[in-house]
Amino acid sequence: MRTLLNIVLGLVVLGGVALLAFIAVPVQPTPPQQQVAADWQPEEGQGEYAMRLADCAACHTAPGGERFAGGRAIESPLGTIYSSNITPDDETGIGGWSLEDFRAALYDGMRPDGTHLYPAMPYENYRKLTEEDVRALYHYFIEEVEPVQNAAPEADLPFPFDQRWTLRGWKWLALDEPGFRADTDDPVLARGEYIVEGPGHCSACHTPRNAIMAEAAVDTSDEAFLSGGEIAGWTAPALRGPGSAIAGWSQEDLVAIFSTGRNAHAAVNGEMQLVIQDSTQYMSEEDLAAMSAYLVGLNEGVLLERSEDVTETEALIASADPDMPLGARLYIDNCNACHFANGRGADEVFPELDGNSLVTAESPTGLISMILGGSELPSTPKRPYSLRMPGFSDRLTDEEVAELASFVRQGWSNDAAVVSADDVADLRGEAEAKVE
Amino acid sequence: MTPKFLQTSRRAFLGGSAAAAALSALSEPALAQRNQPTLDQYEPVYLTAAEWAFVMAAVARIIPSDGDGPGAIEARVPVFIDRQLAGDFGAASDLYMEGPFAPEADMNLGTQSPLTPAEIYRQGIAAFDAWCRSEQGAALGDLDPDAQDAALQALADDEVGLKPELREFWTLLLQNTKEGYFADPRHGGNAGMQAWVYIGFPGARANFHEWAGRDEAYPLGPVDIAGERA
């Protein structure tokens, strides 16, 4: 009996020591992935360009706030997380961080004091950054950005997710090997792959999350990578495979969407507008071409389901029959002027609804939000005009929005589930709460 | 002749409509339009009782109710005019209103009155009703239709002795009556889109190009900016 007690006691003590070690023993940060000379300096503008590639601004700037001063609320399924201040302010920012500290934040999701960062910071992807990009970013944020004093609010997560030390275990399960390894020998495609997998962190939204809410895949060789995810209730569409939103798009189509937010098929919506606004529109022609070529390659062999014939939907709309179903009638009265009877819209102005990933997404959240609140494209040097779709919340009741959304989800070659008025009521309530 | 810069441009009208749509949170729900007070219950925002009586009488002669389609009264044109005069249009918010003014200058030189449209209505109605009383024995609203037509004809022919500052009165009244008849119902006139139904205009649907050039009537009734169908 005494022996058994001793063993149990011993195990408890051992477990306690292990737990303390787990909490208290510092994590060994990931070392540089390439050798770069100690006196290496980025070229003029290289740091800022790396910041654009990594799109630091989108998350680390609050709406109406100082650039990079953090405080932007990021809704996660577990609660609200606030982005941190990454200006070189000594008190509230990253002033005084060493290169090693900075790299540990990007690669390992660690602050210098050992605090674990929530994976809203995409270190799963930033682990692939080259040492040159890390050094360029470090130079930019420490030497080029002006310090701003602004303490970001604490994350608002329920127990146990507010226990940041547990993230050490999560990282142990979730994090892949650091460093980037191309899936191709072609240097152009490899550059595109690097941007997508690494700094561009496309996968943070466009890849599904697994059981522990890590990205299901972080590199091209795995078919789950870029197979579609969700962000703030909106669907981030698949970029490869059978439901790919960009199937059939040319390299030029992709370059256009990245540099202007619009192309012959689509207009970006939701969070992707921030990506265009703060990141991709600043990419060089070479990088845009590389990234686009890589994405075209991912979609080789994916066939478009769209029919080129006149669809029943188009014939119904064109008939202007007063006895047509309400959904079709609402389309004529509200949508047809821009998106047309064939659902094809107009190149670079009105996005196609036939085959549109927002329209046919499994979750209708994005489509309903779009109908209720409208959308405005970012202005870019190549396409300065902020084209705007108006919201229809004052024109349409919940039932009408549901009829209309169901109609476009099943119109032309689309084949998505119908929408209920309750779905609409919930989203309208949220939208109105935000306005107030 | 309508002074060009008193006319609401289509671009400004559409822009204003789009802006109004964007401010949906501030606008009344579209459904509220159905429960409007009748014209005799309507409480004018800008016009006095005497001015309201004049506008009711004048628009009823400009677009009478005994023709094929709805008259200005059925279309609630007086409501449109009252609301316009109470708003930016009446206050000349979009017009250059600094001097020098030369009210007696040639009409081809455009509007020269220092008065806003709301002031032109106020002074114009008073002066014209005074002329009606002295020539016909009663204010316009109290005359019989033939006498009203004769009086309005005299006004249109500039034969009622209005001072130069008021010479746009008739063109404004005529223009605003047409606008109230055909404008989107959100502005108070064209009640129930009756004017659009009458002329076969499909309203704010904005596109029916599948039907352009076809030698048959477009089958759908109009839709207004609030999304109502008629």
Image (tube, coloured by chain):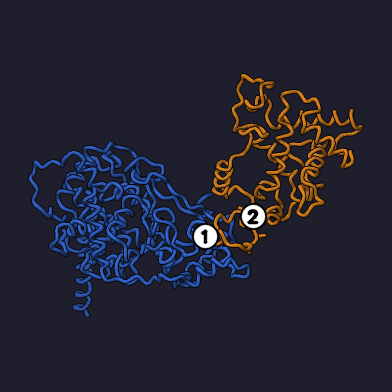
Residue A14 visible in this rendered orientation of the protein: yes
Q: Residues within 10 Å of mark 2 (few under 14, many from 20)?
A: some
Query: At 39% across and 63% down in the image, what residue appears?
Result: A235
Indicate the quadrant where residue B139 lies: top right
Residue A421 visible in this rendered orientation of the protein: no
Give above or below for B9 relative to A257: above
From the top left corner, tell me how far across and down residue A155 is, in percent: 37, 53
Q: Which residue is mark 1?
A: A336
Chain under callout 2:
B
Indicate the quadrant where residue A19 lies: bottom left
Q: Residue furthest right?
A: B137
Question: In the picture, which chain is orange?
Answer: B
Q: Are marks 2 and 1 in contact (CB under 8 Å)?
A: no
From the top left corner, tell me how far across and down residue A129 is, in percent: 19, 54
From the top left corner, tell me how far across and down residue A122 is, in percent: 27, 56
Disc sitting over residue B201 in the figure: 2
* Mark toward the viewer: 2 or 1: 2
